[in-house]
Image (tube, coloured by chain):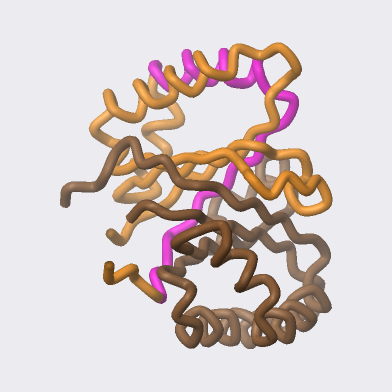
Chain colours: A orange, B brown
Amino acid sequence: MAGIKHLVMAKFKEGAAVEQLLLDMKKLALELDIIKSFEWGEDVMKNDKYSHGFTHTFIFMFDSAEDVAAYIKHPRHVEYGKKFRAGTEKILAVDFPTVIDKIATA
Amino acid sequence: MAGIKHLVMAKFKEGAAVEQLLLDMKKLALELDIIKSFEWGEDVMKNDKYSHGFTHTFIFMFDSAEDVAAYIKHPRHVEYGKKFRAGTEKILAVDFPTVIDKIATA
């Protein structure tokens, strides 16, 4: 699907309620129709030289940059964002229109 | 598609041959059957506070962690990696089995 990806990476604080934050992020993604797809995962390479300490990657897909902007300002996102930031040591985020050069056929 | 994502982010050096590096990466992704899908994009948010200076994101999908390991050691990847590293100021990379919680239906 063509669209714009909102990619977030996190390094959680020691003792953060990671499971709850992950559950609440999933709820948020499922509840907001503006989010077209959501996938995430935890790094298994665990090489700080490459990961820069980030352990989790979250990829949200939107139809347009306008939809990403609307999501960022959405009260549900603002509310969740406060809890997310409180639980993280550092966050990375980029938005990019996705260029699909090769698609899985199986 | 279930699988493992190999995600790479780059901040290119001033004067790096970015277009050529992007073209060669696409060629690599198309040539190697072990790479099941490949997509990439350039950050449009352009907020260093969040991007940590990374401008480009590349997402490769593999069937398994073993396939990622085979790719990393593949002569074509090793060869490309030298050029890529020479052109970048910093690189981020993580590998994560992807959890798909919401799939685009349109």
Residue drawn at 52 percent across, 61 percent down: B59
Classify the position of the N terminus of chain B by image quarter. Answer: bottom left
Residue drawn at x 79%, y 77% is B87
Q: Which of A9 and A2 lies nearest the eye of the viewer? A: A9
Q: Does A86 appear in magenta? A: yes
Total numbered labels placed on residues in the image: 0
Span of residues in magenta: A75-101
Q: Nearer the viewer, residue A97 or B105?
A: B105
Q: Is residue B92 magenta?
A: no
* Position in image of residue B99 (x %, y %): 41, 40
In the displayed structure image, the side of residue B52 where residue A42 appears, left or right: left
Residue at the image position 43 percent from the left and 59 percent from the top: A97
Q: Is residue B96 left or right of residue A15?
A: left
Q: Is residue A27 left or right of residue A41?
A: left
Q: Residue furthest front?
A: B66
- Residue A30 at x, y = what percent? 29, 28
Tell me which residue sits at (50%, 47%) in the image.
B97
Q: In the drawing, does residue B15 fall left or right of residue A68?
A: right
On screen, residue B59 above or below B99: below
Residue sitting nearer the eye, A86 or A40: A40
Residue A73, how many percent across, how many down?
43, 26
Residue A62: image x %, image y %?
Answer: 34, 46
